[in-house]
Image: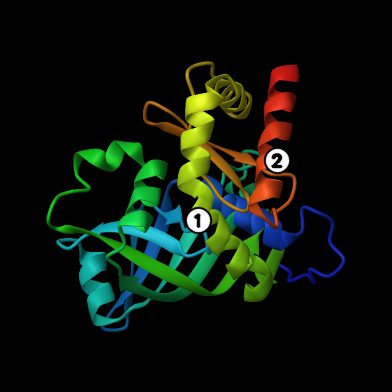
């Protein structure tokens, strides 16, 4: 049976931090919607906005999109890899809230940076971006390790998230233009694969590197509190990757 534990006095890998890292790392999940009271689950490819909202590019022809238009209540399950042959050793995060369609080019660009293969169909007229603002979240860190998360701790600081979102374009362009060797090193260290990795995005919890259609995540040691600290974490990651 899954037991709930208190998050107080946890070290850096506190449940809320594990949950954030899991959410920002995993590229696939399960969306649960409602149709006249009947639950319905389907595969989605979520991304994460700077403020922690779940982003989904959904087809208007799909069942789950029709459900959300009628009833925006939903949940998304994001699961990592199991630690053993027992599937219950996999970390997983359930986020619940209300979903809404959103027309925001910046958020769509961020989602596409995490799912570059979707450029093939993202412009089709029946596809649209949806945003799920977390109202509650629960992390299961493995077998018998469940934590109900406080939303105020789970979500990034709004002011920090906004500042990094405003600076992200400049950070990505600068790193790829002037520090391509560092991006290659960080990407190789995070993925175990050599190649011309490029930065796809950065936020308060880490950065994403892309090689063709593959995207990997590199975490900061802890959530950063400013753009300057983010830059310092990039330098640390690059030095560590080169040393490795």
Frontmost residue, 33 versus 173: 173
Residue 16 placement (x, y as % from top left): 69, 62
Could you classify mark 2 by the number of other residues whose Cα lies within 10 Å: few (under 14), some (14-19), or many (20 or more)?
many
Q: Please say if 211 is above or below 141.
A: above
Is 78 left or right of 34, judged from the image as shown? right
Q: Please say if 34 is above or below 128.
A: below
Could you classify mark 1 by the number of other residues whose Cα lies within 10 Å: few (under 14), some (14-19), or many (20 or more)?
many
Which residue in the rendered view is the most extreme toward the right? 9
Q: How many numbered badges does the structure rendering display?
A: 2
Residue shown at the point (46%, 36%) measured from the top left: 173
Asked if the residue under mark 2 is in contact with the one under mark 1, i.e. CB atoms within 8 Å, the reply is: no
Mark yes or no: residue 153 visible.
yes
Frontmost residue, 178 versus 204: 178
Circle 2: element type: helix
Residue 170 placement (x, y as % from top left): 48, 43
Circle nearer the N terminus (1, 2): 1
Mark yes or no: residue 244 visible.
no
Is 116 left or right of 61, judged from the image as shown? right
Which residue in the rendered view is the most extreme toward the left? 125
Label 1 – label 2 distance at C-alpha: 16 Å
Circle 1: element type: helix
Which residue in the rendered view is the most extreme toward the top? 194
Residue shown at the point (56%, 25%) measured from the top left: 179
Q: Which residue was labeled with disc 2?
A: 233
Residue 244 placement (x, y as % from top left): 73, 19
Mark seen at residue 57: none
Frontmost residue, 189 versus 59: 189
User: Tell me, what colour scheme is on the image?
Assistant: rainbow
Quadrant including the N terminus: bottom right
Residue 14 placement (x, y as % from top left): 76, 59
Q: Which residue was labeled with disc 1?
A: 165
């Amino acid at each position: 049976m899954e037991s709930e534990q208190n998050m107080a006095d946890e070290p850096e890998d506190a449940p809320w931090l594990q949950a954030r890292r899991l959410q920002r790392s995993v590229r696939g999940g399960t969306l649960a919607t409602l149709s006249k009271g009947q639950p319905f689950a389907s595969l989605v490819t979520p991304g994460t906005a700077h403020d922690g909202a779940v982003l989904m590019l959904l087809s208007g022809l799909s069942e789950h999109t029709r459900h959300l238009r009628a009833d925006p209540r939903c949940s998304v399950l994001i699961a990592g890899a199991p630690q053993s042959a027992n599937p219950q050793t996999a970390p997983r995060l359930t986020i619940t809230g209300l979903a809404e369609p959103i027309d925001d080019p910046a958020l769509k660009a961020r989602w596409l940076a995490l799912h570059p293969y979707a450029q093939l169909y993202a412009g089709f007229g029946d596809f649209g971006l949806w945003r799920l603002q977390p109202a509650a979240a629960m992390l299961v860190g493995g077998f018998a390790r469940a934590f109900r998360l406080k939303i105020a701790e789970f979500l990034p600081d709004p002011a920090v998230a906004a500042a990094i979102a405003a600076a992200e374009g400049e950070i990505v362009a600068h790193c790829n233009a002037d520090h391509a060797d560092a991006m290659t090193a960080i990407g190789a260290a995070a993925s175990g694969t050599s190649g011309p990795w490029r930065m796809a995005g950065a936020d308060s919890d880490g950065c994403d590197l892309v090689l063709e259609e593959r995207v990997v995540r590199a975490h900061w040691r802890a959530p950063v509190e400013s753009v300057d600290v983010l830059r310092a974490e990039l330098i640390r990651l690059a030095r560590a990757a080169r040393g490795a």
